[in-house]
Amino acid sequence: MKIIDSPIKRLEIIKNYNHFFTRVIKAVVDIEREVIALDAELHSDLEAILLDKGSKQKNLWGVNLYLNDEKNRIEYTALINIRPSLKNPSMEILDERIRKKIQKIIERLILD
């Protein structure tokens, strides 16, 4: 597992932090601290690491990264995203503002 808090090359992530699946890298983004935890079998494992590092539950959102794809690199779906109290009753992140914030964080930290 790795926490990304400064820019890193996409190919470095694919090479060094892709231990569980061939096409997808699970990630959790802290939209307040603007960090990404990645490379685990479950989003909940990444969520736990960020919580241990001081993140707040309400700021953590799970995504799947397809870094080999030119299009649709981010899938906004994870079990940890089911949060009726935050008006997100689905595994998919429904709030477009949160999705855009996640996209900006990923684009800033994961470089082509």
Image (cartoon, rainbow, N blue to C red):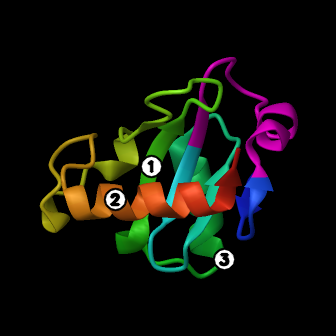
- Look at the image and give the residue range highlighted in magenta: 9-26
Q: Compare residues 22 and 105 and report the one nearer the observer.
A: 105
From the image, tell me which residue sits under label 2: 100
Tell me which label, 3 or 1, sits earlier in the chain: 3
Residue 109 picture quarter: bottom right
State which quarter of the image contains the C terminus: top right
- In percent of width and height, residue 46 lies at 61, 53
Q: Is residue 99 above or below residue 33?
A: above
- In percent of width and height, residue 49 lies at 65, 63
Callout 2 crowding tier (Cα within 10 Å): few <14, some 14–19, many ≥20: few
Is residue 69 highlighted in magenta?
no
Mark 3: which secondary structure? Answer: loop
From the image, tell me which residue sits under label 1: 62
- The Cα–Cα distance between marks 1 and 2, rounded to whole angstroms, is 14 Å
The reply to whether callout 3 and callout 2 are in contact (CB within 8 Å) is no
Of circles 1 and 2, the one toward us is 2
Q: Which residue is drawn at 80% across and 37% down?
A: 11
Q: Which residue is drawn at 67% across and 22% down?
A: 21
Residue 92 picture quarter: top left
What amino acid does circle 1 point to? Gly
From the image, tell me which residue sits under label 3: 53
Of circles 3 and 2, the one toward us is 2
Tell me which label, 3 or 2, sits earlier in the chain: 3
Q: In this view, does 30 lie to the left or right of 53?
A: left
Q: In this view, does 45 lie to the left or right of 87?
A: right
- Checking the image for residue 18, the label placed there is none
Q: How many marks?
A: 3
Tell me which label, 1 or 2, sits earlier in the chain: 1
